[in-house]
Image (spheres, rainbow, N blue to C red):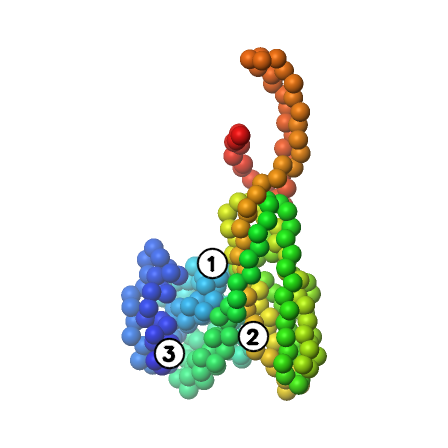
Amino acid sequence: KQWYQRRVRGLQRRVIWSESPPPTRWIVSFDNDLLDGLVLATLLSSYCPFLVNLHFSDMYLNVRSPEECFHNALSIIHALRSLGIDYDIHPTDIMQPNAINMLLFITHLYITLPQYNPKTTVMFEGALHQPVFKELKIQNPSNKVISYNVTIVGEDHSSFSVQPSTVTISASSHAVVKVGFSSSWLHPCNAALMLVSRRTGVACGSTLVFSLQSLVNDILPISTLHVETAVYKLLKFPLLVTNPLSNGGSFKIALVE
């Protein structure tokens, strides 16, 4: 109880719900204090901040009906599934909690969630719209075969790519995971690379998480247009602009030297 008391009673609730955070709650039970899902959301996001925008930003902070309680509980279940946490729990188990079952669930999170602390940060630096690739060497020091599901999560996950999506590593061997990044805008992108172990018989490896960050350090022209005119003579000419993104939008045009 002390572990999640420290995690929940800190500033994390203000990180998730910055505009109107719920009041501080002293947790004294494993049933009634968990049924609205807010404590669990705070606990999960303290290890995995990317869950906030994906699952927790639209949770009800003052639950007044079973429907709102179900919505919050479903958000918790979706977050657990996105993390690949293999635990048999359903929304009704959170809405109508059994203290012993929730104690076992919290104990599972106590063992599992620290694995989601990033092992290291992988930095991608390059020019705008130019792909950058990095290779990660994943070591298996055990004498068992270990398999992983490989995914990229986070608000900017679409800017990153990874191959392969599943990887199997023989005993005392290693595998290489290739991660790519292609910038569509100037601001830094952040995501997380997750390798969640798939149980193969009795062998099951630890979850591996790597923080992915980007930095656009150069802007290269897509094309060059040559124009000739006399000094001080205004010349108007058409310029074809192509949207390199998959979605339409409004773009600001600026001239720089």
Depth check, mark 1 against mark 3: the one in front is 3
Q: Earlier in the sequence, mark 2 or mark 3?
A: 3
Mark 2 nearby-residue class (10 Å; few <14, some 14–19, many ≥20):
many
The residues tagged by marks 1 and 2 sit, at their Cα atoms, a distance apart of 22 Å
Q: Residue at x 60, y 70 (%)?
A: 195
Amino acid type of disc 3?
Trp
User: Secondary structure beneath disc 2?
Assistant: loop
In-image side of 169 versus 218 (left or right): right
- First of labels 1, 3 by sequence position: 3
Residue 14 appears in the rendering: yes
Q: In the displayed structure, would residue 124 be above or below residue 85?
A: above
Query: What residue did someone put label 1 on?
Result: 53
Res 77 visible? no
In front: mark 1 or mark 2? 2
Query: Which labelled disc corresponds to residue 119?
Result: none
**Between marks 2 and 3, how big is the CA–CA gap?**
20 Å
Residue 81, given in percent of the width and then of the height, sits at 55, 70
Image quadrant holding the N terminus, namely: bottom left
Residue of label 2: 207
Which residue occupies the foreground of this view, 252 or 182? Answer: 182
> 8 and 229: which one is in front?
229
Q: Which mark is residue 3?
A: 3
Residue type highlighted by circle 2: Thr
Mark nearer the N terminus (1 vs 2): 1
* Label 3 neighbour load within 10 Å: few <14, some 14-19, many 20+: few
Evaluate if marks 2 and 3 touch, with contact meaning CB atoms under 8 Å apart: no
Question: Percent position (x, y) of residue 95?
Answer: 42, 75
- For the point 60% across and 56% down, the residue is 160
Q: Position of residue 247 (x, y in %)?
A: 60, 44
Label 1 with label 3: CB-CB less than 8 Å: no
